[in-house]
């Protein structure tokens, strides 16, 4: 038997032994998702979570966190024509509406140049700022607010 | 002789009475038919029988609270766009003949044409609602009966200050049942659109 052929046969035998030693479901158990169903199984029905009604601004959990949206946003239009968020949170509008004004960090273009108005790359507010529902955490955790913010 | 005269008079009188009765009945039939025809053009089904309405404004409206909601109480097209009172209703219906002309010449026959015209059409409707103090909103939402204690934090505050300052529903509530035309919002370069004075008219007492 030539050397490469022997190696190949040995590898084959080893692979067979390993497959026999492991229970058949072991590989499936190894990837257990917290969504509670197999990846190939049909989508789990959404929980029917309700948006939380209007409340006072929610305190941040860490310094760089985009502030959370403390109000309902159902039916808010954010399209090419109109941005509902900016209808209250723009610098020209916040005094009248009593909303929090957009952060100065949103007035920079991608090269760091200062602009006199909100940068178009910040247009889709809800990519970072998210509304809240009454959903409970999927798994228990010991997350604590950053020390400087407690 | 006199008997014959009497008979003639009676005949004339009888004919007069029956003419009045016939005219009265015809009046009822005509008025009923007119009203029926008018009401037939005042239904959602009639409105979306034109593809212009069905493919543009109706599609957008289907995602809003006036189409589908918790209790199933709806406001359909004519509830907002046709006045309920007789005289304003007749005026609006006569004005709508221009919309029939628009349909025939196809002025908004494609979504692209509609989007281009939207800025003008939306402002027409805002102007109409502003002029009648948002009567079509107030047919259902009577602000004298608002219970501020169950309104949200924002609506509670804004409704009281706005209404005290003499503002009307449409001053703030634009684009609630359809998408908005381009609005000038000062984000990035100037793209035109509805100017802030139209989008957020100042309350009369502040001017």
Image: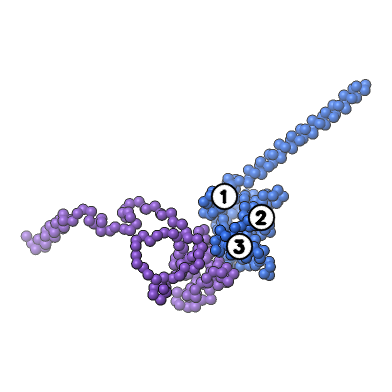
Chain colours: A purple, B blue
Alpha carbons under labels 1 and 2: distance apart: 17 Å
| Residue B28 placement (x, y as % from top left) | 72, 37
Q: Quadrant of the C terminus of chain B?
A: bottom right
Q: Which residue is mark 2?
A: B135
Q: Residue B195 sits in which quadrant?
A: bottom right
Judge by depth and name the residue closer to the eye, B40 or A147: A147
| Residue A121 placement (x, y as % from top left) | 47, 70
Give the chain of mark 2: B
Q: Residue at x 45, y 70 (%)?
A: A59
Q: Same chain, marks 3 and 1? A: yes
Numbered badge on residue B159: 3
Look at the numbered discs 1 and 2 and tell me whether their residues touch, using CB distance below 8 Å: no
Judge by depth and name the residue closer to the eye, A26 or A4: A26
Q: Earlier in the sequence, mark 2 or mark 3?
A: 2
Q: Earlier in the sequence, mark 1 or mark 2?
A: 1
Judge by depth and name the residue closer to the eye, A77 or B113: A77
Q: Is residue A87 above or below residue B102?
A: below
Numbered badge on residue B74: 1
| Residue B10 placement (x, y as % from top left) | 86, 26
> Callout 2: helix, strand or loop?
helix
Q: Which mark's residue is nearer the viewer, 3 or 1?
A: 3
> Callout 1: helix, strand or loop?
loop
Give the chain of mark 3: B
Q: Quadrant of the N terminus of chain B?
A: top right
């Amino acid at each position: 038997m030539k050397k490469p052929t022997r190696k190949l046969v040995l590898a084959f035998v080893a692979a067979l032994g390993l497959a026999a030693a492991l229970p058949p479901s072991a590989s499936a158990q190894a990837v257990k998702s917290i969504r509670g169903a197999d990846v190939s199984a049909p989508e789990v029905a959404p929980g029917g979570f309700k948006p939380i009604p209007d409340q006072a601004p929610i305190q941040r959990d860490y310094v760089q966190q985009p502030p959370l949206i403390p109000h309902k946003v159902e039916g808010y239009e954010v399209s090419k024509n109109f941005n509902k968020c900016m209808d209250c949170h723009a610098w020209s509008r916040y005094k009248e509406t009593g909303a929090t004004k957009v952060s100065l960090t949103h007035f920079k273009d991608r090269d760091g140049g200062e602009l006199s108005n909100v940068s178009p790359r910040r247009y889709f507010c809800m990519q970072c700022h998210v509304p809240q529902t009454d959903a409970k955490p999927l798994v228990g955790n010991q997350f604590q607010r950053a020390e400087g913010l407690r | 002789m006199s008997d014959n005269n009497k008979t003639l008079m009676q005949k004339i009188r009888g004919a007069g009475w029956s003419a009045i009765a016939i005219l009265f009945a015809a009046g009822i039939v005509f008025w009923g038919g007119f009203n029926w025809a008018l009401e037939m053009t005042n239904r959602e089904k009639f409105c979306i029988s034109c593809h212009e309405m069905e493919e543009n404004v109706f599609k957008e409206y289907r995602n809003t609270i006036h189409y589908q909601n918790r209790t199933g109480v709806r406001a359909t097209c004519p509830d907002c766009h046709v006045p309920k009172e007789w005289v304003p209703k007749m005026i609006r219906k006569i004005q709508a003949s221009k919309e029939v002309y628009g349909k025939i010449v196809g002025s908004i026959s494609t979504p692209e044409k509609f989007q281009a015209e939207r800025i003008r059409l939306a402002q027409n409707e805002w102007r109409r609602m502003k002029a009648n103090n948002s009567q079509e909103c107030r047919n259902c939402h009577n602000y004298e009966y608002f219970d501020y204690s169950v309104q949200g934090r924002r609506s509670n505050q804004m409704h009281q200050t706005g209404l005290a300052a003499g503002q009307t529903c449409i001053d703030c509530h634009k684009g609630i049942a359809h998408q908005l035309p381009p609005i000038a919002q000062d984000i990035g370069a100037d793209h035109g659109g509805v100017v802030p004075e139209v989008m957020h008219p100042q309350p009369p007492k502040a001017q």
